[in-house]
Image (cartoon, helix red, strand yellow):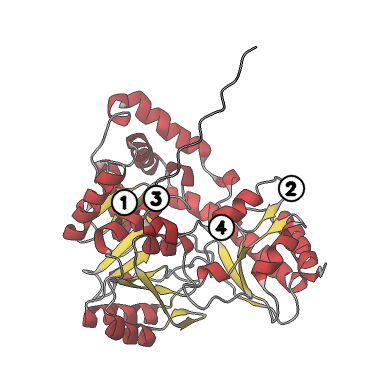
Amino acid sequence: MTVTEPAPPAAPTPPLAARARAVGGSPVRDILAVTARPEVINFAGGLPAPELFDADGIADAYRAVLAETPAQALQYSTTEGEPALRAALAARNSVRGLPTHADDLLVTTGSQQALSLLSTALLEPGDPVLVESPCYLAALQSFRLAGARVVAVPGDGDGLDPEALEELVVRERPKLLYTVPTFQNPTGRTLPAARRAAVAAVAARHGLWIVEDDPYGELRYEGERVPWIAAHPGAEDRTVLLGSFSKVMAPGMRLGWLRAPAALRRACAVAKQAADLHTPTVNQLAAARYLADHDLDAHVRRVAAVYAERRDAMLTGLADALPEGATWNRPEGGMFLWVRLPEPYDTTALLPRVVRRDVAYVPGAPFHPADPDHSTLRLCFVTQTPAEIGEGLRRLGAGLRDRG
């Protein structure tokens, strides 16, 4: 008779660093895990519509670089990024009103990595960082993981208030201001040109550094483009501009970039060397080849036209789906709109009931760095067709009315 020895106990987990213990996971990622079932109409994610990817054009670009320059495409690369891609990105920035040289740019593994690199390069524990309220969740994660003290700048439906910003800059002496001024995540709002100029003036007067995140700016459906804060006098030498191909080409390529003055860019490059050495070479070369062989702007216009129809479908159906007294905005572009339900609705408490109806949203509370508004929620309108949006709103309305 063979006696089976009991398995030895698993080794205990080593003590986590205080920053890892203090920062939780992303509520959006948690919701996506719960709502991964195909029957769920998911307004919670920030996912571009996969059927609109230019899969053939991207595949052609990969085939070309692997056929023509396989040794380069499959080899290590420089931390700063492939010269061909940096040159193409610099040209796109320059055409859009911000003179940029290839050497001004650092290619990152998605613009989320740019936030992590900046946090590593700039932030000491306890440093104040100013943010919008509500704010992009993963930025809050990054700053808090670095031990920063996050301070919300008051604002309204148009975004942060420059006068309130100036008061906080004087009082807090922050390390930086983080903002998504165009089609903001989560609200979809756009900071008007006059406020951008005022923010730039505050930066010039008080030496404030600005991190301007622009992942959605090219997805405009109506209205005129508003210039970057980085392009305004007074901000040009103290603004880090972040960009990404995730919403206009494909998120799976994990390609982003930051434009920054030389000393800060070098510090971010050192941080990147410690993180991943460099962004995958083949992805960078494929993106550069795609930009050379295809008209990305024409592709974005086609995508934006479809997204505009989906936004309009959601706007049309909200009045019937939401309770009387609810309010929402009309974004001119991007991927999200912001809803406030009347009292006493609590969107966090309501979510499980709504998910039982096979539809999902993101509660607004986690986006607030302080004083969460539990009556708010974010809806993403780009991933579903107009028909699916209509059905999803019908389910949402039923879930909100369900008191069981």
Return the residue at label 4: 28
Q: Secondary structure at mark 3?
A: loop
Return the residue at label 2: 39
Return the residue at label 3: 15
Measured Cα–Cα span from mark 3 to mark 2: 40 Å
Measured Cα–Cα span from mark 3 to mark 1: 43 Å
The kind of residue on which mark 1 rests is: Leu
Q: Position of residue 208 (x, y in %)?
A: 26, 75
Q: Secondary structure at mark 4?
A: helix
The kind of residue on which mark 3 rests is: Pro
Q: From the viewer's perspective, is 234 left or right of 243? A: left
Q: Position of residue 23 (x, y in %)?
A: 44, 60
Q: Secondary structure at mark 2?
A: loop
Q: Secondary structure at mark 1?
A: helix
Q: Residues within 10 Å of mark 1 (few under 14, many from 20)?
A: many
Return the residue at label 1: 89
Q: Position of residue 400 (x, y in %)?
A: 76, 69
- Note whether 162 is above or below 179 in the view shown: below
Question: Mark 4 or mark 2: which comes first in sequence?
Answer: 4
Whether residues under marks 1 and 4 lie with C-beta atoms below 8 angstroms apart, the answer is no
Whether residues under marks 2 and 1 lie with C-beta atoms below 8 angstroms apart, the answer is no
- Along the line of sight, which residue is nearer the eye, 118 or 50? 118
